[in-house]
Image (cartoon, rainbow, N blue to C red):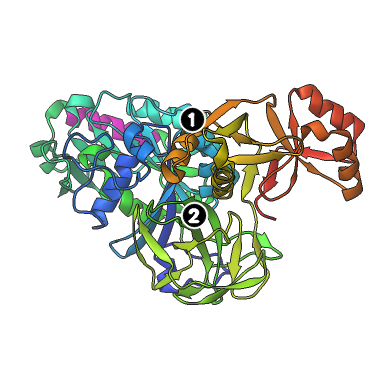
Amino acid sequence: MLDAPKNRPDLPAEIARRRTFAIISHPDAGKTTLTEKFLLYGGAIQMAGQVRAKGEARRTRSDFMAMEKDRGISVSASAMSFDYKNFRFNLVDTPGHSDFSEDTYRTLTAVDAAVMVIDGAKGVESQTRKLFEVCRLRDLPILTFCNKMDRESRDTFEIIDEIQENLAIDVTPASWPIGVGRDFIGCYDILRDRLELMDRADRNKVAETIEINGLDDPKLAEHVPEALLDQLKEELEMARELLPALDQTSVLEGTMTPIWFGSAINSFGVKELMDGIGLYGPEPQVQSAQPRQISPEETKVSGFVFKVQANMDPKHRDRVAFVRMASGHFRRGMKLTHVRTKKPMAISNPVLFLASDRELAEEAWAGDIIGIPNHGQLRIGDTLTEGEALRVTGIPSFAPELLQGVRAGDPMKAKHLEKALMQFAEEGAAKVFKPAIGSGFVVGVVGALQFEVLASRIELEYGLPVRFENSQFTSARWVKGDRQEVEKFIKSNQQHIAHDHDGDVVYLTRLQWDIDRIERDFPALTLSATKEMMV
């Protein structure tokens, strides 16, 4: 384990064994499959499902919305907790699709590290780059898994170069692939001097491991064909010359990433990656908050809501707030203060997740992620504490890039529609604006696919067919400034004014010219494209 910085006490053993991380990648790099294998090795499930399952093959556990199952994509970030060896893993699976980047961004505020999945044939793709930037902003440690090595993929050095150049981070190999595509037989574990051989016949079988003594061990020749062995020795010699050795401090500072190679669908390389997360991943970290930071070893309990998911169980109209525990040892039934409303809340039935399965959580420690079922009291950005008025910071809300009007198929059900929209707004799934003039709502999202998801969820969860239609507005800005100035501004721009679900004033624009005009006519006001969640 790492030495804790000199001024920080050692963490209690229960907290120190926790590893809370997210998996990030471009769509289709194999992220959901990797998540499944993590659960398989953590003993959490008996047989891994496949994303596009055929016939009786099981559906993956981490995708629970109907649309996710139909399309084979992950739309909402789900959280899962399981034990692996002597570690407790809290894994947050994020949507890889770029249309859901805001959910992903918020999820990354709740983890201490990220596992970046890269497709061996495609290398660093656009969405990977975007998500990596977010990790960079937060100095998150990153561990890399290069997937799909059993298919035709690029040269190993080429993949490493691309990561170094595109993402400006040092890369150090933790394992090295032997052969590629059809000739791929396994990996050489650089960190532990072992040979890992892949079994193509049984996808749920753990790879065979052969302990060897360095690259000159004659045992290698028994398992690796001569041509591949010569290539391996040559490549490893080059790698040792050209690439930096693993330095744990650099990994924790986010300036170096160790890379493992494998094939998630064949259960290969996954166990080594999990060992790596345990050994090199960070313990629960300090959380930034106002008026002071929160340290995980504090005895008083605190946590913050980073995600709200409505209707996870279609039979009950529930909302589950996903809470990242920031400090202390939480026990079921505790009374915590809801800082925004200053009211006490008894947390009587908190849940732990295994994708869509849940069980009652009797206790949780700093680093854990628990779900608190509630009826809309908890929102994204809320902080829960044992009384102290702390507010966790850095959970952003972004201005939507696409705006559309929305109508219920049945005009008599306008009230139901309002309820559904407010629920999605609190969940962070969309921005909902109520224009000052006229009836109806304007819905804003980051990517077009979100309109489809919203329409399908409103119909499924509320039995309400809806129609999205073009809006005259193209973007939205939050208005900040002195109250009198804001009121004067509202009076002279009634046509463009709306309020979001928190009641904050929003300026709906048609053209960049609208924004420039306001900045010229009202220099004391700020038009902002982001706002801190639930101040």
What residue appears at the point 49 percent right and 54 percent down from the top-left corner? 112
The amino acid type, in three-letter code, at marker 2 is: Asp
Is residue 239 covered in magenta?
yes
Please say whether residue 156 is visible from this viewpoint.
yes
Rendered location of residue 361, percent (x, y): 39, 69
Secondary structure under the numbered disc 2 in the rendered image = loop
Rendered location of residue 307, percent (x, y): 52, 52
Rendered location of residue 186, percent (x, y): 20, 37
Question: CB under 8 Å between callouts 2 and 1?
Answer: no
What residue appears at the point 22 percent right and 46 percent down from the top-left corner? 48
Is residue 118 covered in magenta?
no
Q: Residue 242's image quarter? A: top left
Range of magenta residues? 228-241
Marks 2 and 1, the one that precedes in the sequence: 2
The amino acid type, in three-letter code, at marker 1 is: Leu
What residue appears at the point 34 percent right and 35 percent down from the top-left corner? 146
Q: Which is more toward the observer, 333 or 255?
A: 333
Q: Magenta part mainly helix, strand or loop?
A: helix
